Amino acid sequence: MIPEPLPLDQVDLADTANFTDGVTPWRMFHTLHREDPVHWQPEPAPNAGFWAVTRHADIARVDRDPETFTSAKFVNLEEVDDDQIKIRASILEMDGVRHRALRGLMQRQFGAKIISQYADFLRGLTATTLDAAFAKGSFDFVADVSADFPINVLARLLDVPEGDTKQLIDWGNRIIGNTDPDYADVLLDSEESEQYRDLPFRSPASLEVFAYGRELARQRRGGTGTDLISRLVNETPRDGVPLSDRDFDNYFLLLVVAGNETTRHAISHSMLALINHPDQLDLLRRDPSLIPGAVEEFLRWASPVYHFRRTATRDVELGGKQIKEGDKVVMWYAAGNRDEEVFDRPYTFDVTRTHVDHLTFGKGSPHLCLGNLLARTEIRIMFEELIPRIADIRLTGEVPRVRSNFVNGIKKLPVEVTLA
């Protein structure tokens, strides 16, 4: 169903309140596609505003050109000074040689050969997760399935105790949910946040993640483990520059957050879409061979990360607009995933859609999501195991969203299941 456009003068991508109903974002994106695809969005002080890029082709252009649109000035909307960047920079906030070197530490671990070795583990974990949830009959799909499953995968990759998974989820909620009162210890735009300005997402939970990671690093430094932490502390990047303690802190925090949040929300949105489109669920039930292809439609539809930011390094023309050096340029991946110039019937959820050229993991970018193959594998196996086991699944309550214009998150998905 095509959303009703919102008048252009009412579009406000900076207001997180517009991202809590599951409808308004798509109304704003629909308007911008048609009226102002490279749109200047004012922001409340102290921020200076940003260019919102919403067309698929323009997003891909920005993503592929780090020399003109750099990540090194930060990738979120928050405006930070040079000292903060030095302290807070993860591989997300780096370009060039150093970025490639740090990315290379993990690249092989997320490649096809390694991920294929996890297939049996993932199926076993999926079965365990679903058994526990289905035994309840009625349950919160987010808490019991879509959050529980990927965090246990992450625990395996990091080689941390299963008993720590709830803490990992809590940290992710508190850090990524820094604009949601239900999650944040300190809201991003509050005066109190200034005392945490040097922490990722200005979240005091980052200190807890740092302490946890440092203890794991201490235990594994000099060892022979093959887990992600052992590789970070015992391998030297290709550029020959060892990770500093700060590099490790920021890398570890990124693994904790990115390794859970996006896959979790992608699974939640996919399940909600199948509930709301029972004909599509029935197609997959009757022909499970459609599921691997449907995963790409799940990812397009879910768009678990709304945006990433770049900063212009020079004056440049984009989409007919003149971008000035130093301007924030924000790629709205979710908007690009509904671009009617690329996707036929973009607001239709269609599990038989082919050639799904979505932007969910980035597009031709040096920052292409490292874990994209793992995420795809997790989602595929989850629904290959789930769909044959259910005769019916229905909502039993409201579906609240995370108050955020960064992560497209679902807080709760109350359901009742009838088993096949």
Image (cartoon, grey):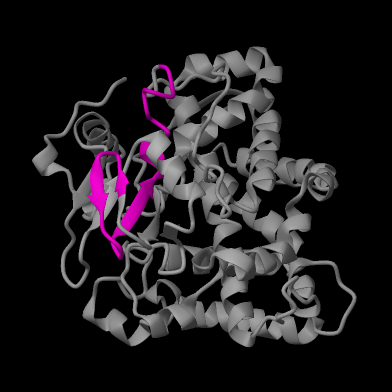
Q: Is residue 254 above or below residue 56?
A: below
User: 102 or 353: which is nearer to us?
Assistant: 102
Q: Quadrant of residue 310?
A: bottom left
| Residue 132 in view here | no
The residue furthest right is: 224
Residue 242 position within the rendered picture, expressed as x and y whole percent measured from the top left: 72, 82
Residue 212 position within the rendered picture, expressed as x and y whole percent measured from the top left: 63, 80
Residue at horizontal 39 percent and vertical 50 percent from the top: 307
Q: Is residue 404 left or right of residue 362?
A: left
User: 415 or 17: which is nearer to us?
Assistant: 17
Residue 144 position within the rendered picture, expressed as x and y whole percent measured from the top left: 57, 48
| Residue 113 in view here | yes
Residue at horizontal 46 percent and vertical 32 percent from the top: 301
Looking at the figure, which quarter contains the C terminus? top right
Residue at horizontal 23 percent and vertical 36 percent from the top: 32
Q: Is residue 63 above or below residue 191?
A: above
Residue at horizontal 81 percent and vertical 47 percent from the top: 118
User: 336 or 4: which is nearer to us?
Assistant: 336
User: 158 or 325: which is nearer to us?
Assistant: 325
Looking at the figure, which quarter contains the N terminus? top left
Magenta stretch?
A: 317-344
Query: How many marks can you see?
Result: 0
Instruction: Give yes or no for residue 326 being in the magenta stretch.
Output: yes
